[in-house]
Amino acid sequence: MPKISVLIPAYNAMNYLPETIENVLSQTFTDFEVIVVNDGSADETERWVSQIKDPRVKLITQENQGLAGARNTGIAHAKGEYITFLDADDLWEPTKLEKQLRVMEENPEVALVYTWVAFIDEMGKPTGRVFKNQAEGDVWQKLTEHNIVESGSVAMVRRSCFEDIGLFDRNLGSYLEDWDMWLRIASRYSFKVVKEPLVYYRQLSGSASRNWEAMARSFEIVIEKAFSAAPSELQYLKNRSYGFANICLAWKALQSQAQDWKSAANFRAKALAYYPWICFSQEFMRLSIAITLMSWFGTEGYKIFLSYVYNLRQRIVAIAR
């Protein structure tokens, strides 16, 4: 039996899937299986994956069930003691599995190990953004504020957890189903973090994650579910959770194709109403600056400003290397 199962949901993913699978097969730790769940693709995903010679790569084809459904299918077929997830357009550092596995084996009480995340653009170039979360141990309270795991391509989880916690919630479709799962795991188990950016999250234009209108309902479902099972002494955190959810939705409105700063401002107002102390957070301040810039200079002026910031970040990253 393989030590680790790598689950890759794939829906019309051929633009990036070959690079992603090549990336996985270059891991320094080699005792793993790769399960590609072809989730009703209309492109060449099924034919291409079926021709891969490496016996560690397995293909499952099903009718489209969405991201949660594809992950659940992968879990049902996984043979590894540990399960890790990888979106078909993301990449890993070669040592990701090795370093996460070491932490798992040294900490038997830990159910999930996550890492830091670096953002890349559509061409695979670093944008300069790196998420460096520090929370470990009992992370549930922190997780209700922010998805510290950041990306669906990060977590390594003991397979036994899914037997206890259950599978991904398909009612959430492709929005926040991972956050919901990490909250459920955190309510019973400890987390650890590898403090290195071992995951490269690819930012795509028109990404489903920017559909802020659909995400609003998913936020409500996840938060209500999480706090329905929480003890009474933690219920005070619920408004804080809604506050930060509305900050996230405000960013999604700004990042949408319409770059809707008025909707972003409305979400910001809701965040303040839920949790007034949020005005002192770094995210609130960054959001307020972005909304102000867009209201003053318009969509095109804001794009020019962002382009300048991204170019500056990339230069800093290049110099650091």
Image: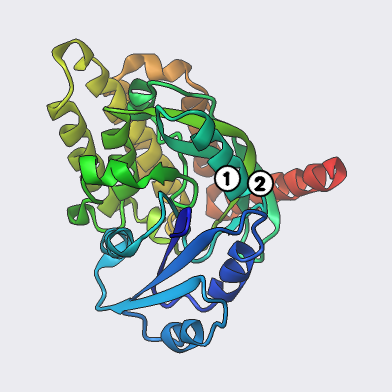
Considering every residue shown, the one lying at the far front of the view is 1
User: What residue appears at the point 54 percent right and 82 percent down from the top-left corner?
Assistant: 52
**13 or 62, which lies in front?**
62
**191 or 181, which lies in front?**
191
The quarter of the picture where the C terminus appears is top right
Q: Is residue 188 left or right of residue 158?
A: left
The reply to whether dot 2 and dot 1 touch (C-beta < 8 Å) is yes
Q: Amino acid at mark 2?
A: Phe
Residue under numbered circle 1: 297
What percent of the width, then of the height, locates residue 287? 49, 33
Residue under numbered circle 2: 305
Quarter of the figure with residue 203: bottom right
User: What residue appears at the point 47 percent right and 41 percent down from the top-left corner?
Assistant: 150
Secondary structure of the residue carrying tag 2 is helix
Q: Amino acid at mark 1?
A: Phe
> Could you tell which of marks 2 and 1 lies nearer the N-terminus?
1
Secondary structure of the residue carrying tag 1 is helix
**2 or 158, which lies in front?**
2
What percent of the width, then of the height, locates residue 136? 47, 24
Q: Is residue 74 left or right of residue 321?
A: left
